[in-house]
Image (tube, rainbow, N blue to C red):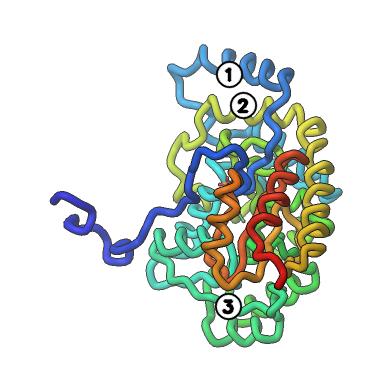
Amino acid sequence: MRNIDDLPIRDELKGKSPYGAPQLHVPVLLNTNENPYSLPDALVARIAERVAEAARDLNRYPDRDAIELRTALAGYLSASTGHAVSTEQVWAANGSNEIIQQLLQTFGGPGRTALGFAPTYQMHDLISRGTGTGWIEGPRNPDFTIDVVSAEAVLAADRPDVLFVCSPNNPTGTAVARETVERLYDAAQAVKPTLVIVDEAYVEFSHQPSLLPLLEGRPLLVVTRTMSKAFGAAGLRLGYLAAAPAVVDAVQLVRLPYHLSAVTQATALAALEFTDVLLGYVDRLKAERDRIVTELRALGLEVTDSDANFVQFGRFEDTHAVWQAILDQGVLVRDNGVPGRLRVTAGTPAENDAFLDAVRFALPSPA
Ligand code: PMP
């Protein structure tokens, strides 16, 4: 048994590749939608303090229910959306990927299906399969918005158990209108009780307000969030959800005991103390994102409207060649497999200048 093909792994995993963007060492990394600003010194010091406190008790298991952290996250959600969220409505895990996995372990699984609108965040598909949940792709309009009428038809025909609405959507950057989510929720419930997961990983960068207030009166709606993007803490691995308390209770059935280490909880709490400072970078990144859209359009490229910290652009006949030509200039962007299109994360102004120069260089000169 020398390689993976010889091992008796599950049939649905055979021939698959692990998810992950190339981690190449080039000067400008704009491929994984990270925040380019490192944490301020005062926060680094506060993390050291909080972690030192937690370290003394590492002989004990951490707070399994992460009450202090969930309370702080509920405070952030309530203050930033104007919609009151309680500790009982919030759950946290190691990145929103783990949150999504726990939701699928609870509401999906063998014999069940999840539906998302392609192209969308690939991990929705992969985590579905990884939890034995069948994956169904719903359609999008040519401008990557969701077509509610065809979505309603797909929901009625395919009867999924879980529905993903990614807003803003990765990799297109497209935000979903509140009315669209309301209609999708109702259309799904009209067929059968369906968990509707609104993935708001990038919502802090959106021109539109959060969809969180839709939780009111919708017991099967879940909003997932992360500290990886707007909070600039991708290395922390902290994602969370807001939903009805019953959904949070249900997820307890599958979470591993003590899944969130005391070090993670202490670090996340320190970061949340610095919410205002960290979110101060969001305005800069939004302005840079808008500048990238404008400048790429000025180059004659087709650019999808973006509500996230990244921009989808094209169209290219040979997408890989353009990706490589940009990389040859020292700038790493992402090929998500959307035909003719690439995705760039908004970085610092200097990084974005380097990217725009690389694109100008990579584009074939006009005939
Ligand atoms: N949702 C979306 C739409 C994402 O793009 C990502 C990260 N790329 C995640 C969830 C997961 O983020 P994390 O696990 O770092 O919270």
Name which of mark 1 and mark 2 comes first in the sequence. Answer: 1
x, y percent for residue 13: 32, 61
The amino acid marked with disc number 1 is Val
Foreground of the two, 51 or 195: 51
Q: Nearer the viewer, residue 301 or 200?
A: 301
Residue 138 sits above or below residue 285 on the image: below
Mark whose residue sits in front, 3 or 2: 3
Q: Answer with the quarter of the image where residue 164 lies.
A: bottom right
Q: Residues within 10 Å of mark 1 (few under 14, many from 20)?
A: some
Element marked by disc 1: helix
- Circle 1 sits on which residue? 51
Question: Could you tell me if the residues under marks 1 and 2 are in contact, i.e. CB atoms within 8 Å?
Answer: yes
* Label 3 to label 2: alpha-carbon separation: 38 Å
**Nearer-N-terminus badge (3/2):** 3
1 or 3: tag closer to the N-terminus: 1
Q: Is residue 153 visible?
A: yes
Residue beneath label 3, please?
138
93 sits left or right of 2 in the view: right
Which element type, helix, strand or loop, lies under badge 2? helix
Amino acid under label 3? Gly
Q: Which amino acid, by three-letter code, is at mark 2? A: Thr
Q: Residue at x 59, y 29 (%)?
A: 265
Disc assigned to residue 267: 2
